[in-house]
Image: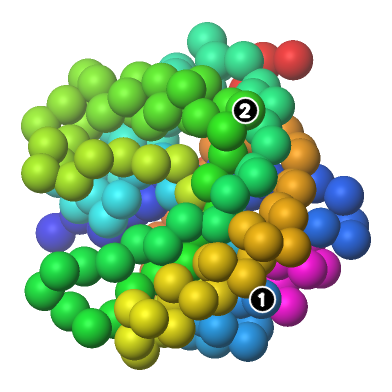
């Protein structure tokens, strides 16, 4: 059986911004906070191909993809109509298209058939998971009223898997520039 792999990108941001995001995650997403540091997920839970094929594909995409500047200025509610739980996301306005195109490039070749067409992709950094959507909505509203501003860059792709409650890196692939 193939390992279940993810491709993520850690944001390169000012230390103060990363500390703020980390504090939000510690307070509102303790499970995610304990698992992996703040990130954009670009490929979700894939076990359809062997690890070598997966790593080679991510390396090839990274080798032809430029680093991506981004700026998150919006806290977005991520609610599920079938669950009372909801998430709070930081969503970039600048860099949104470039991150989405990188996501699309990763879902080519050996990962082509793994793209979930029923779930539209929105690049984001998860900063909270709430038992009630109303609480997530209020948290997002409060952040947006205060003003969200997290600029940064995505400069590498990381492949990893969840092992015993930790995200274990299997490879790192720098982007161009």
Q: Earlier in the sequence, mark 1 or mark 2?
A: 1
Q: Which mark is residue 116?
A: none
Looking at the rendered structure, the secondary structure element under dot 2 is strand
Where does the N terminus fall, quadrant-wise? bottom left
Dot 1: few (<14), some (14–19), or many (≥20) neighbours within 10 Å? some
Residue 50 vertical position relative to residue 2 in the rendered view, above or below? above
Q: Residue at x 40, y 35 (%)?
A: 55
Q: Is residue 121 left or right of residue 148?
A: left
Residue 60 lies left or right of residue 86; in this view the side is right
Where is residue 15 drawn, in percent x and y?
89, 57
The answer to which of 77 and 27 lies nearer the viewer is 77
Which residue does the numbered mark 1 point to in the structure image? 24
Q: Is residue 93 above or below residue 144?
A: above
Residue at mark 2:
94
Label 1 to label 2: alpha-carbon separation: 22 Å
Range drawn in magenta: 18-23
């Amino acid at each position: 059986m193939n390992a279940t792999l993810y491709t993520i990108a850690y944001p390169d941001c000012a230390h103060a911004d990363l500390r703020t995001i980390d504090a939000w995650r510690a307070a509102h997403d303790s499970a995610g906070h304990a698992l992996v540091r703040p990130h954009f997920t670009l490929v979700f839970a894939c076990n359809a191909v062997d690890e070598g094929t997966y790593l080679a594909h991510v390396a090839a995409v990274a080798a032809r993809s430029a680093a991506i500047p981004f700026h998150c200025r919006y806290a977005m509610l991520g609610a599920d109509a079938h669950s009372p739980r909801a998430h709070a996301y930081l969503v970039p306005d600048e860099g949104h298209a470039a991150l989405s195109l990188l996501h699309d490039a990763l879902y080519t070749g050996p990962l082509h058939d793994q793209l979930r067409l029923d779930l539209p992709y929105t690049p984001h950094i998860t900063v909270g998971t709430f038992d009630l959507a109303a609480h997530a909505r209020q948290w997002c509203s409060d952040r947006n009223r205060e003003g969200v501003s997290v600029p940064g860059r995505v400069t590498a792709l990381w492949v990893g898997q969840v092992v015993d409650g930790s995200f274990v890196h299997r490879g790192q692939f720098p982007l161009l520039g």
